């Protein structure tokens, strides 16, 4: 069965030249989605576009009484940041296509640095956050932000594809590796991830008290979206 195309529909004009793109698709747990959600709420972002596909579950996420696509792009032109924010835990078969779509979008908007993240399950207290970069300049940025550079390991999913493709086309990509218990809502790892992202993106900030509130809210929505999409998938592909 042929897979449907994933499309980006931009809703307004914006200029992000020389700026940043954040990948907020959930990986293990919900921390990356919650951290990006917190950043969007803290630093005046506006809806700039939607990401959609015939293969995405047909779901509307209702927030404050308004319908929303589950995968959206938020823009802050002052900070020159675009955030790919999603409540969908995408099937592995779509990871490569979504990553390539992000890279094409980054190229179109002349993005200097793509920031992604991946969770490692760990119950260790104060386990160190690390980063991995696609280029020498990305690795320098990791050190400048006070993060340790990962020397050996494997990075799965969308972050892994972004790193590989970024290294081939000389696009700076940084993947932050953070620790999570895997039990939600993992407020601690979301807060740490948000703070690490703000070290890499000048002007971006995290409102920690609101993050605690957002973590609970966002986790509930993400869980509900995932449950709904699982039910839909079961009925769609029978």
Image (tube, rainbow, N blue to C red):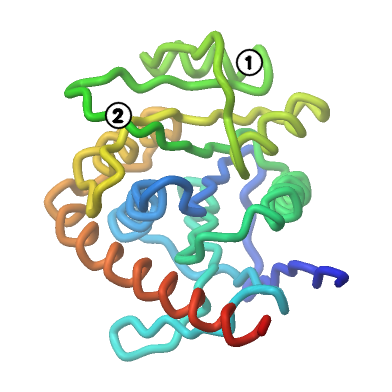
Disc number placed over residue 97 in the picture, else none: none
Q: Relative to 204, does residue 89 appear above or below in the rendering?
A: below
Q: Relative to 3, does residue 58 appear above or below in the rendering?
A: below
SS for tag 2? Answer: loop
- At which x and y percent is residue 209? 12, 51
- Left/right placement of residue 210 relative to residue 75 reads left
Q: Dot 2 corresponds to which residue?
A: 122
Nearer to us in this view, 233 or 196: 233
Of badges 2 and 1, the one in the foreground is 2
Do the CB atoms of the residues marked 2 and 1 lie less than 8 Å apart? Answer: no
For image coordinates 30% across by 64% down, the residue present is 218
For image coordinates 38% across by 89% down, the residue present is 66
Q: Relative to 61, does residue 97 appear above or below in the rendering?
A: above
Q: Dot 1 corresponds to which residue?
A: 137
- Left/right placement of residue 136 relative to residue 190 reads right
Count of all numbered marks drawn on residues in the image: 2
Dot 2: within a 10 Å radius of its alpha carbon, few (fewer than 14), some, or many (20 or more) residues?
few
Closer to the N terminus: mark 2 or mark 1? 2
- Left/right placement of residue 168 relative to residue 201 reads right
The residue furthest right is: 2
For image coordinates 23% across by 61% down, the residue present is 214
SS for tag 1? Answer: helix
The quadrant the N terminus occupies is: bottom right
For image coordinates 61% across by 59% down, the residue present is 91
Nearer to us in this view, 141 or 126: 126
The residue furthest front is: 238
How far apart are labels 2 and 1 at the CA level? 29 Å
Dot 1: within a 10 Å radius of its alpha carbon, few (fewer than 14), some, or many (20 or more) residues?
some
Q: Relative to 30, does residue 137 appear above or below in the rendering?
A: above
The quadrant the C terminus occupies is: bottom right
């Amino acid at each position: 069965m042929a897979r449907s195309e994933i499309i980006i529909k931009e809703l307004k004009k914006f200029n992000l030249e020389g700026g940043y793109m954040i990948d907020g698709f959930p990986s293990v747990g919900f921390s990356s989605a919650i951290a990006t959600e917190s950043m969007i709420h803290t630093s005046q972002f506006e809806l700039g576009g939607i990401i959609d596909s015939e293969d995405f579950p047909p779901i509307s996420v209702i927030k404050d009484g308004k319908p929303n696509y589950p995968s959206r792009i938020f823009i802050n032109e002052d900070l020159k940041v675009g955030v790919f924010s999603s409540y969908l835990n995408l099937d592995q078969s779509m990871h490569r296509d979504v990553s390539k779509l992000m890279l094409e979008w980054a190229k179109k908007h002349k993005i200097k640095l793509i920031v992604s993240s991946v969770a490692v399950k760990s119950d260790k207290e104060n386990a160190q956050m690390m980063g991995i970069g696609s280029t020498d300049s990305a690795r320098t940025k990791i050190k400048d932000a006070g993060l340790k550079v990962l020397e050996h390991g494997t990075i799965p999913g969308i972050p892994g594809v972004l790193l590989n493709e970024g290294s081939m086309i000389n696009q700076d990509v940084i993947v932050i590796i953070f620790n999570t218990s895997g039990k939600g809502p993992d407020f601690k790892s979301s807060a740490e991830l948000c703070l690490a992202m703000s070290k890499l993106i000048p002007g971006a900030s995290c409102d920690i008290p609101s993050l605690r509130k957002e973590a609970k809210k966002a986790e509930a929505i993400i869980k509900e979206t995932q449950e709904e999409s699982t039910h839909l998938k079961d009925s769609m592909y029978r």
